[in-house]
Image (tube, grey):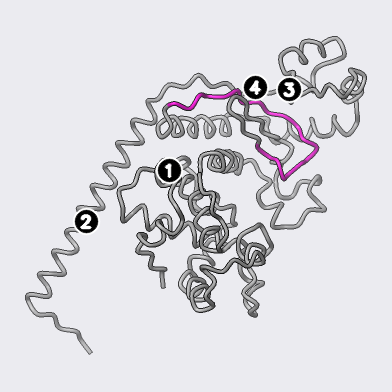
């Protein structure tokens, strides 16, 4: 059966299409203008490869290293400990692995530089820190450490999903131990410092908090794919997109939004092999789907309001949700 429109309906539809096209063109032009401005920001940024310095040093170079990097040498340990570590077989194995994966560091360096240009654009008063690469004995819980003046990046936690160092790790952890994830983890570390949201007692507040983190990445690392921002595999991100409506429906119908049960964090927020709906499809789903939905809510809010990024990161979760006009994709 063919659907017929009246001339008035056709006129209204055409006007709507034209309006949406104008909005799209204006948005794209504005985005391109911002990116041009960002690309012109000058940065005095050098990545200090402490991992290589330590690997190529002997006992005679230790005093100079301790002078230049005192914060990396605990006073609890005698110099003999550091000297022994320089020649330790496990340390040398780590050095060799990192050199192999990061033989060409230019792409990683370029992405980090791009990130700091974007950070300077949105936070003009933020000082550029010293960036230092280290080894951490594969401490994947602290891959990136950010302070006001120093940033540490543990390169031995980015050697690739199939690396032998990670053989005993769960797959959902291993999938983000690759060098393409460095700048995303860097953005996460900064988002954690810049977001102000003291109230995180409800499931909705947790979702919005992580939604803020992920939207922060939309603006600060726009050159990364969405699945990389959230730390999914491409097929996991596709699953989340395809099931967005049903995920949201489940949350609403089960009245989870204002629930304070902390078990919801393990089911839908913190890293896990899959999300737990207590349904047969659980094993097909990626973990952290609460973060994904929070991202979509925050993105919808920013599309429907004119709030600057810095202000949005300080807002109450309920205010964002009430004004987001969020409608999940069917």
Q: Nearer the viewer, residue 6 or 273?
A: 273
Residue 21 image label = 2
Q: Quadrant of the N terminus?
A: bottom left
Q: Quadrant of the C terminus?
A: bottom left
Q: Residues within 10 Å of mark 2 (few under 14, many from 20)?
A: few
Q: Quickly name the residue at label 3.
A: 71
- Distance, label 4 to label 3, CA atoms, is 14 Å
Label 3, secondary structure: give it. Answer: helix
Q: Residue at x 22, y 58 (%)?
A: 20
Q: From the viewer's perspective, is the residue at label 4 or at label 1 nearer? A: 1
Q: From the viewer's perspective, is the residue at label 3 or at label 1 nearer? A: 3
Q: Residue at x 53, y 42 (%)?
A: 191
The mark tally for this picture is: 4
- N-term mark: 4 or 1: 4
Residue 326 lies in the magenta stretch: no
- Distance, label 3 to label 1, CA atoms, is 32 Å
The stretch of residues the image draws in magenta is 125-144
Farthest-out residue, bottom? 1
The picture places residue 21, in percent across and down from the top left corner, at 22, 56
The picture places residue 29, in percent across and down from the top left corner, at 26, 42
Q: Quickly name the residue at label 4.
A: 48
Label 1, secondary structure: give it. Answer: helix
């Amino acid at each position: 059966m063919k659907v017929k429109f009246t001339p008035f309906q056709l006129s209204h539809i055409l006007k709507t299409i034209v309006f949406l096209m104008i909005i799209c063109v204006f948005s794209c032009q504005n985005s391109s203008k911002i990116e041009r401005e960002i690309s012109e920001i000058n940065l005095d940024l050098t990545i200090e490869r402490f991992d290589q310095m330590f690997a190529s040093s002997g006992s005679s170079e230790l005093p100079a290293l301790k002078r230049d990097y005192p914060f990396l040498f605990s006073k609890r340990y005698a110099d003999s400990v550091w000297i022994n570590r320089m020649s330790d077989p496990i340390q040398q194995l780590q050095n060799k692995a990192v050199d192999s994966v990061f033989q060409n560091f230019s792409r990683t360096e370029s992405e980090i530089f791009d990130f700091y240009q974007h950070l300077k654009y949105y936070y003009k008063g933020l000082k550029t820190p010293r960036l230092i690469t280290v080894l951490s004995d594969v401490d994947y819980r602290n891959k990136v450490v950010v302070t006001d003046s120093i940033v540490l990046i543990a390169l031995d936690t980015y050697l690739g999903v199939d690396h032998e160092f990670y053989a005993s790790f769960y797959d959902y952890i291993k999938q983000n131990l690759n060098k393409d994830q460095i700048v995303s983890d860097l953005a996460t570390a900064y988002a954690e410092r810049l977001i102000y949201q003291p109230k995180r007692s409800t499931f909705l507040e947790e979702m919005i908090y992580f939604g803020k983190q992920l939207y922060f990445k939309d603006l600060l690392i726009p050159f990364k794919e969405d699945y990389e921002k959230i730390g999914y595999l491409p097929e996991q991100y596709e699953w989340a997109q395809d099931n967005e409506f049903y995920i949201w429906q489940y949350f609403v119908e089960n009245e989870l939004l204002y629930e304070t049960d902390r078990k919801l964090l393990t089911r839908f927020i913190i890293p896990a092999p899959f999300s737990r709906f207590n349904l047969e499809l659980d094993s097909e789903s990626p973990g952290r789907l609460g973060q994904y939905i929070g991202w979509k809510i925050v993105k919808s809010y920013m599309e429907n309001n004119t709030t600057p990024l810095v202000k949005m990161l300080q807002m109450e979760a309920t205010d964002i949700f009430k004004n987001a006009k969020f409608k999940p994709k069917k």
